[in-house]
Image: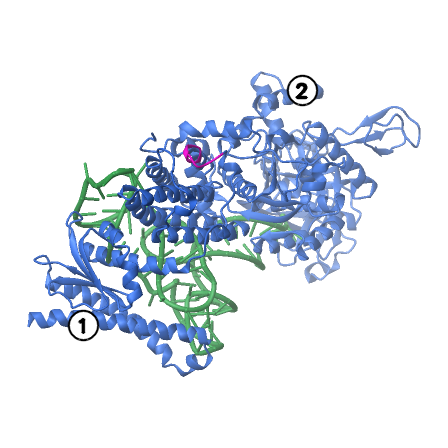
Amino acid sequence: MMNKGYEPKDVEDKWYKHWEDNGFFKAEVKSDKEPFCIVIPPPNVTGSLHMGHALNNTLQDILCRYKRMKGYNVLWQPGTDHAGIATQNVVERDLVAKGTDRDQVGRDKFIELVWEWREKYGGVIINQLKKLGSSCDWSRERFTMDEGLSRAVKEVFVRLYEEDLIYLGDYIINWCPRCHTALADLEVEHEEKDSFLYYIRYQFENRDGHLTVATTRPETLLGDTAVAVNPEDGRYKDMSDSHVLLPILNRPLQVIFDRYVDTEFGTGALKITPAHDPHDFEIGNTHQLERIKVIDEDGRMNELAGPYKDMDRFECREKILGDLKDAGLLEKIEPYRHSVGHCYRCKTMIEPLLSKQWFVRVGPLAEKAIAAVKDGRTRIVPSNWEKVYYEWMDNIKDWCISRQIWWGHRIPAWYCDECGEVIVAKEEPKECPSCKNKDLRRETDVLDTWFSSALWPFSTLGWPDKTDELKIFYPTSVLVTGFDILFFWIARMMMMGLHFMEEVPFGDVYIHALVRDMDGKKMSKSKGNVIDPLEVIEKFGTDSFRFTLAAFAAQGRDIRLSEERIEGYRHFVNKIWNSARLVLMNLDGDIDLEPEDIVYTLPDRWILMRLGQVSEEMTRALDEYRFNDAASSSYQFVWHEFCDWYLEMAKQGLYGQDETMKQSARYILQEVLMAVLRLLHPFMPFISEEIWQRLPGAHGSIMRAEFPEASDFRTDEQALNEMDLVMGVITGVRNIRGEMNISPSKKVDILIEMPDKKDVEVVRSNIVHIKNLAKVDSLDIDTAVSKPEASATAVFGRNQVHVLLKGLLDFEEEKRRLRKAIKKVQKDMEVSNKKLSNKGFMEKAPDEIVDKVREKVASMKVKLDKLDKNLIFFESIND
RNA sequence: AGGCACGUAGCUCAGGGGGAGAGCACUACCCUGACACGGUAGGGGUCAAGGGUUCAAAUCCCUUCGUGCCUACCA
């Protein structure tokens, strides 16, 4: 016997284990089935499941379960990402807590500790994904630092270097003084900050007067090597060969001319610090300026900063401003708002720094990646993200891939300090190829984590080996992810996939929403507005949660999530449970009936027809990644058609005396429920399995069942029309009951008028349902009837139903009701009539539209006549 | 600064050239033998504003206002 309410906790772990133990998640290498493959966006090993993961993986799981049921050989490739900086930070924090640090521990030992940490905690997020129901092929789980993927990384690095697509160079990069590493441009978060613009005087070297420059970062002036003005700027025309003196240090600086300088901004004179500003660096290159680095890797001033040596960069700013003021060189200070770069990991202010780093020359790779989307080899859904993709790709800059941390793929490069040779190779070289020196120094930097992530779609499938998996599953079918990593990850996978596999990494990219709180704000720990997916699962069950996410996953819009919403869908899950409970209560014992003896009633024919239509709707929606449409189709159908109408009508057969009808009802009911469960399974894997396993007619796991198709059900338009008539009567009576406030327990007598004889027959053979669902005692029906005096009337189509209300009918109330109905029809009719009398409409509108409007007017006219007659009837009685 | 979305019922949102929709909330009546996490019925909208295209606009175009987000080197 089933519980009265659905208890998710009793079933979820049980079925997940069952599926996993039976290998239902496993992809096949030898198979005739068409392949379908998704690689998971690898979560960080340090991570724990948040709403973004929950949505992302729910959608992937829906697709995978759906495709399995559709007969595909599905591979959902799981794994995690080593998250260089994040993971290193976590382990470093541990060390600090123990009173030591990574330098004391040493590189090798430190990496050992990270691996230990990963062994211990790296599985957390994987287990959380399992709680969500994710049907990944866990036997193939990969990690970006595992042996195979590391081999892929090395291979790619060496090949790109040999093709001159990776180079080593001295450039200005984004430096995080706290993480102690370079960051790619993308990893810098810009934030608007209130600050100041300082106007500083630089005295001329050989004459009186000064040039005033404006800057937001006075501390960098110590590294200035020029002052630039625009050659077009009349104010500075005569300054060629002029020199000014750097304040405080009194170093002479050349005045140079460069079109980059904006004459409108500040004073039109720009101080140039090539070692600490990206644009100054560029200008420095064009004018061959000296680069003087005054800030070190800790964000402190170095020996070249003279009196400010060893000061923190912010401390130095204050001090230098004071000194400038004392020297009378600080002309003025203006409040100024501008955006400042911060480290995406630790939010520390970025220091642009001159440094030797490894870069990927992205241009040639990007070209191919742009073309692949342009010609449709990869489709981005929704397509408006294509523009964003192009925008980025068209303006792409070289990618700084070296990181000065320890946890990650160590760059396979060696330096020969004898002759300065740089050797890049997969294996450690024995000697320098040019000078034969045996004492080589290995590069200490590691690669950006995204470098290995960029290879994910093929490295996880076994590349660089030529594996069956690659042959079968590459290119993968679809990548499901949020737009926040469009550039970080998608674009880079496109570039690497095309370069090394010579084929796109995925046919489709489905970009889904971000999960926000009810006020549309991003969920974040600091705001305290996070909803923990695991708490939600605990409270409402996985199926409710998944269904909620899917139901709100409309394309191109973010999801505002609150617990009430999930609670709402828990009601739906419970409704499903109870519908199954009804069915199961009536399925005791075998069904003793030959297939040819099964009697299909009108409601049976109708629900089967509807099942076919809904299957088709859902299939189309899922094929187009319209998860919300698929979810709401099923919601609407299951609750408002299957439960509200079909189950109520099926009770007739179940509770009736006719044994054949009873057996038929039991049989069909079970069939219908099984189809419903199969439709729901991709969204609600647990409850659908739980009920499925209880059904005597079901065999094996629902995971192995087929997703319903329209062709599984007989097309039966007639059933739809006939059911409309029956429902029309019932709704009409209910409507009157409701509006007339007639107690549900009070039965009524009704009289139906249907001009069409066939319609009359249909209704006659379904009287039981009308009596039951509309609480009708006696019922008369004919093609023409005369209206009983004390009756309220509902008009539907060309038919009407009179509800006899002897002694109950409030004549005034009924007149009011009729007038309301008349007014509504008149209003509709007015609009349509206006169209028909519009010459332009009649001439230019398509015939089918005109016909449709004509028909509409005709049927409204019939309805209006009947309503009018009824009203006149009451008005005449009153007089 | 540029770009991209979005303003539809009290709330959250579907829809996307030819009859304004859903869920929740609300109101009334009901514990009817699956379900009160339920049933039946009902109320509620100048589809942000203004203009244009069209026989026809919530839907397409333009402008304005508002709200988000992304990208960008104005020191």
Look at 66% across and 35% down and name the residue there: A449
Residue at image x 41%, y 28%? A9
Q: Which residue is mark 1?
A: A869
- A289 inside magenta stretch: no
**Front residue (pair A394, A478):** A478
Q: How many marks?
A: 2
Determine which of the numbered discs, if any, sits on residue A131 in the image: none
Residue extending farthest to the left is A879
Q: Amino acid at mark 1?
A: Lys
Q: Along the polypeptide, which appears first: circle 1 or circle 2?
A: 2
Q: A433 or A156: nearer the eye?
A: A156
Any part of residue A462 in sight: yes
Give the Cα distance between marks 1 and 2.
Answer: 91 Å
| Label 1 crowd (10 A; few <14 / some 14-19 / many >=20) | few
Q: Is residue A59 left or right of residue A393?
A: left
Left or right, A784 with reference to A203: left
Which amino acid type is marked by label 2?
Glu
Q: Position of residue A806 (x, y in %)?
A: 9, 58
Q: The chain shown in green is which? A: B
Q: Position of residue A840 (x, y in %)?
A: 43, 81
Look at the image and give the colour of chain A: blue
Q: Which residues are magenta?
A: A691-699
Which residue carries the number 2 mark? A112
- Badge 2: few (under 14), some or many (20 or more) residues near its Cα, within 10 Å? few
Q: Outermost residue toward the right?
A: A435
Q: Position of residue A507 (x, y in %)?
A: 64, 49
Give the chain of mark 2: A
* Callout 2 secondary element: helix
Could you tell me which chain the residue with mark 1 belongs to? A
